[in-house]
Image (cartoon, rainbow, N blue to C red):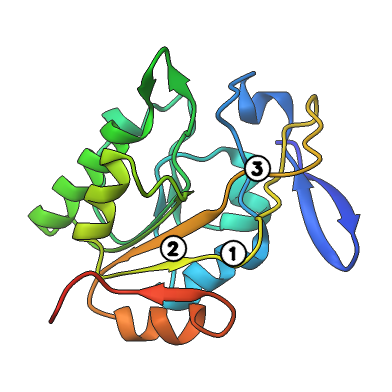
Amino acid sequence: MKSPHLIYIGTLPYYAPSKNCAANNRSFAGTPEWLVEMCRKAMGSIDLDPASCFEANEAVIKATRFYSEADDGLQQPWVCETLFMNPPWNRQGSISALPPWLDKLLQALASGNVKQATVVANTSTDSEPHQKLMKNADAFALLCGRVRFIPPLDRDWSSNPYGQVVYYFGPHWRRFKGIFNKNHTVLRYRDD
């Protein structure tokens, strides 16, 4: 097994995923450790990441179980207490890659197979998938500033052109709010 490559930018450690991690998939964007840790604190742990790779899981996510691109997380069972997901964001033609991941998550939550989840996504709040996420999430955080995602080794991303949002599903939305509200705007669509 290969260990992740560490690159230090300022004082924050980042891993640099290998080409195997991204498998030349343009939708790969490694989630920075600080954001994963906020999600972990909000949920208490991360049991499953259905859209990951070995390097990301070993270095940052540290989920009990993960599915890689080769595993095809959409075809695997999602049964866990806590799920973290930064789903593929690429488009296939004019179709967003997000809807099947969102549909599977909402089904897993509704069936009780998943108890809590956090989803990291672009703030495309005008799109149908995001409208669905906002209406179903127990809370969501609009992140202040651009998130610097971790690119594969063969790519150079100087900046992220999009804002990000983290959606939370589960009973501990007040804890999520307490963690994310310190530096970001947390909203709740529901009245309860």
User: In the visual, does 71 lie left or right of 105?
Assistant: right
Local packing at callout 1 (Cα closer than 10 Å; few below 14, some 14-19, many 20+) is some
What amino acid is found at the position of numbered circle 3 in the picture? Answer: Pro
In the picture, the disc for residue 46 is 2
Local packing at callout 3 (Cα closer than 10 Å; few below 14, some 14-19, many 20+) is few
Q: Residue at x 80, y 24 (%)?
A: 154
Residue 147 is situated, as x and y percent measured from the top left of the image, at 65, 55
Distance from disc 1 to disc 2, alpha carbons, whole Å, reads 13 Å
Distance from disc 3 to disc 1, alpha carbons, whole Å, reads 18 Å
Q: Which residue is mark 3?
A: 161
**1 vs 2, front mark:** 1
- Relative vertical location of residue 104 with respect to residue 114 in this rendering, above or below: above
Foreground pick, 108 / 47: 108
The residue tagged with tag 3: helix, strand or loop? loop
Q: Which residue is mark 1?
A: 35
User: In the visual, does 113 lie left or right of 41?
Assistant: left
The residue tagged with tag 2: helix, strand or loop? loop
- Relative vertical location of residue 89 with respect to residue 168 in this rendering, above or below: above
In the rendered image, the residue lying farthest to the front is 126
The residue tagged with tag 1: helix, strand or loop? helix
Q: Residue at x 87, y 50 (%)?
A: 7
Q: Earlier in the sequence, mark 1 or mark 2?
A: 1
Q: Earlier in the sequence, mark 3 or mark 2?
A: 2
